Amino acid sequence: MEKKRLLIIDDDSRNIFALVNVLRAKSFDCLSSLSAEEAIRLLKTDEHIDAILIDMMMPEMDGYEAIPIIKNIPSRKNTLVVAVTAQAMTGDKEKCLEAGADDYVSKPIDVDKLMHVLNKI
């Protein structure tokens, strides 16, 4: 079975490092991007990506702005997009889903919950 490939979009390289290590241990292949703009350029190519984990709070372009752009890329319309945010306030999940995310996980990330979400791909 081929490994599922994830794109992690987060402006904090420490978060990327931690997620990549956990996900590779769970047999995922990981790509990363430090900005939404860079990720969107990658997503416009034919690079194979099964799911996207996107930090919602980033400078320049945040996840709320980036997700609709990603979902408008024809080849990415059905790609699983998971919002990742440290803001676990009432209504945040709904706000992420309204922006177009398919699911939501809060920081610090519960690996079991994340694996449950990633089982959809």
Image (cartoon, grey):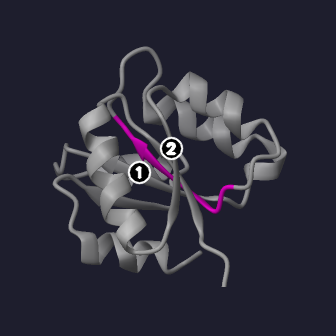
Q: Which quarter of the picture shows residue 48?
A: bottom right
- The amino acid marked with disc number 2 is Ala
Is 45 left, or right, of 8 in this rendering? right
**Crowd band around label 2 with a 10 angstrom C-alpha radius: few (<14), some (14–19), many (20+):** some
How far apart are the two marked residues, 1 and 2, measured between alpha carbons? 9 Å
Q: Is residue 106 visible?
A: yes
Q: Is residue 54 left or right of residue 42?
A: left
How far across and how far down the image is residue 43, in percent? 70, 39
Q: Position of residue 25 (x, y in %)?
A: 36, 70
Q: Position of residue 50 (x, y in %)?
A: 64, 62
User: Could you tell me which quadrant the C terminus lies in?
Assistant: bottom right
Quadrant into which the N terminus falls: bottom right
Name the N-terminal-most of marks 1 and 2. Answer: 1
Count every numbered label the image shows and give the total.
2
Please report the residue visible at 21 percent of the width from the left and 68 percent of the height from the top: 110
Label 1 with label 2: CB-CB less than 8 Å? yes
Span shown in magenta: 49-56
Instruction: Name the residue that disc number 1 marks.
Output: 83
Q: Could you say which disc has been placed on residue 99 in the image?
A: 2
Q: Nearer the viewer, residue 41 or 77?
A: 41
Query: Which element carries disc 2, helix, strand or loop?
Result: loop
Query: Residue at the spot x=20%, y=44% of the render?
Result: 86
As drawn, 74 above or below 59: below
Q: Is residue 103 above or below residue 42?
A: below
Name the secondary structure under disc 1.
strand
Q: Is residue 96 magenta?
A: no
Is residue 21 positioned above or below 119 on the image? above
